[in-house]
Image (cartoon, rainbow, N blue to C red):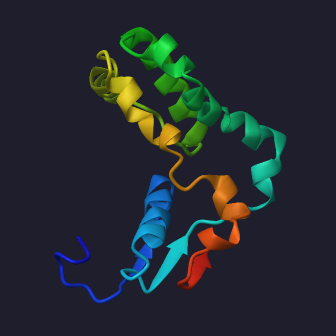
Amino acid sequence: MIEELGLDRPVIAGYDIGSRITQTLAHTRPDLPRALVLPGADARISQRQTVRELCHIGFHWSGLAEALLDGQPERVREYLRDRYQQWSGPDFHLAEADLDHLVDVHGPPGAFAASIARYRAGVGLIANAVAPVPEDRLTMPVRVL
């Protein structure tokens, strides 16, 4: 897209999965971005409650997610309801119609597995960002917010 739009070394910003994609772009095509803007992690990343909230990452890597959820719409419903309650702001309420739509999209066989495939791809692993080996360090300026 950068090339298609004729952009000259733009600053690329990404958050959540977008930050992982941004980092991958910077590693694979360091000639494209001038600089990156990425979200940071603070002391909360090691707090007990945060670790509990991030348990879905290991669950997605393990293969259990597919075995227990994929193609099981009612189980997908409960899982998505839990994740939205856990990760949304205090005033957010997931309407049943919206949850119904999410289940329609993620409930068929193969759909849930496809939606979590990025976790197994290892794109932008936190460990790589926290302690990169020298050959994996980014060469352009990075602003972490």
Residue 50 is at least partly visible in this image: yes
Name of the residue lying farthest toward the front = 135
Residue 140 vs 120, above or below: the answer is below
Name of the residue lying farthest toward the bottom = 8
Q: Residue at x 59, y 80 (%)?
A: 143
Tag count in the figure?
A: 0
Residue 124 vs 3, above or below: the answer is above
Q: Residue at x 55, y 26 (%)?
A: 82
Give the percent coordinates (x, y) of residue 57: 60, 36
Residue 41 is at least partly visible in this image: no
Give the percent coordinates (x, y) of residue 51: 75, 40
Quarter of the picture containing the N terminus is: bottom left
Quarter of the picture containing the C terminus is: bottom right
Q: Relative to residue 47, is residue 15 drawn left or right?
A: left
Q: State which quadrant residue 63 falls in.
A: top right
Give the percent coordinates (x, y) of residue 140: 53, 84
Residue 75 vs 125, above or below: the answer is above
Q: Relative to residue 2, is residue 144 drawn left or right?
A: right
Give the percent coordinates (x, y) of residue 39: 59, 66
Q: State which quadrant residue 110 falls in.
A: top left
Q: Residue at x 60, y 52 (%)?
A: 125
Q: Relative to residue 119, is residue 57 drawn left or right?
A: right
